[in-house]
Amino acid sequence: MQIPSAALSFHYDRANDVLYISSGQSQPSYCDEILPGVFLRKDLYTDVATGVTILYPRDQLAKGIVNWSRMPFGIRESDIRGHIS
């Protein structure tokens, strides 16, 4: 699913090194781990993707762990770097 990164909201919890990326309004969601430390959030009732949670994005970037071609919403490495610096 490709959504322009401008349509996404990013919130970085610096104290816990967790990046929350959301599409649209907050809604009750559940998570599926799609890559190590990367969780796709889906609406409880419709299964539509609502966002992504990335644990330890600084380590993920430094170690080259994330396969960026598999990220939902067309999220790129540059999107992540721009929001955790």
Image (cartoon, rainbow, N blue to C red):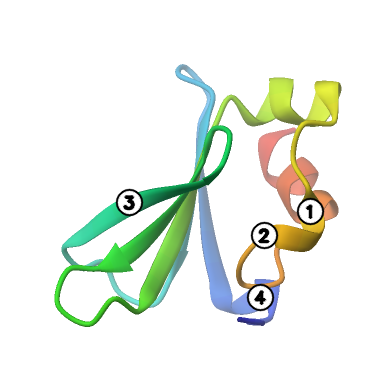
Viewer-side residue, 65 vs 77: 65
Q: Can residue 23 be seen here? A: yes
Q: Secondary structure at mark 3?
A: strand
Q: Is residue 34 above or below residue 60?
A: below
Say whether residue 42 is left or right of residue 45: right
- Local packing at callout 3 (Cα closer than 10 Å; few below 14, some 14-19, many 20+) is some
Q: Which image quarter holds the N terminus?
A: bottom right
Can you identify the residue that label 3 sits on?
31
Q: Secondary structure at mark 1?
A: helix
Say whether residue 81 is left or right of residue 18: right
Say whether residue 69 is left or right of residue 8: right
Which of pointers 3 and 4 lies earlier in the amino acid sequence? 4
Report the Cα–Cα distance between label 2 and label 4.
Answer: 16 Å
Can you identify the residue that label 1 sits on?
68
Say whether residue 62 is left or right of residue 73: right
Q: Is residue 54 above or below residue 34?
A: above
**Is the C-beta separation of discs 3 and 4 under 8 Å?**
no
Q: Is residue 1 above or below residue 81?
A: below
Q: Is residue 54 above or below residue 23?
A: above
Can you identify the residue that label 4 sits on?
6
Q: How many numbered markers are drawn? A: 4
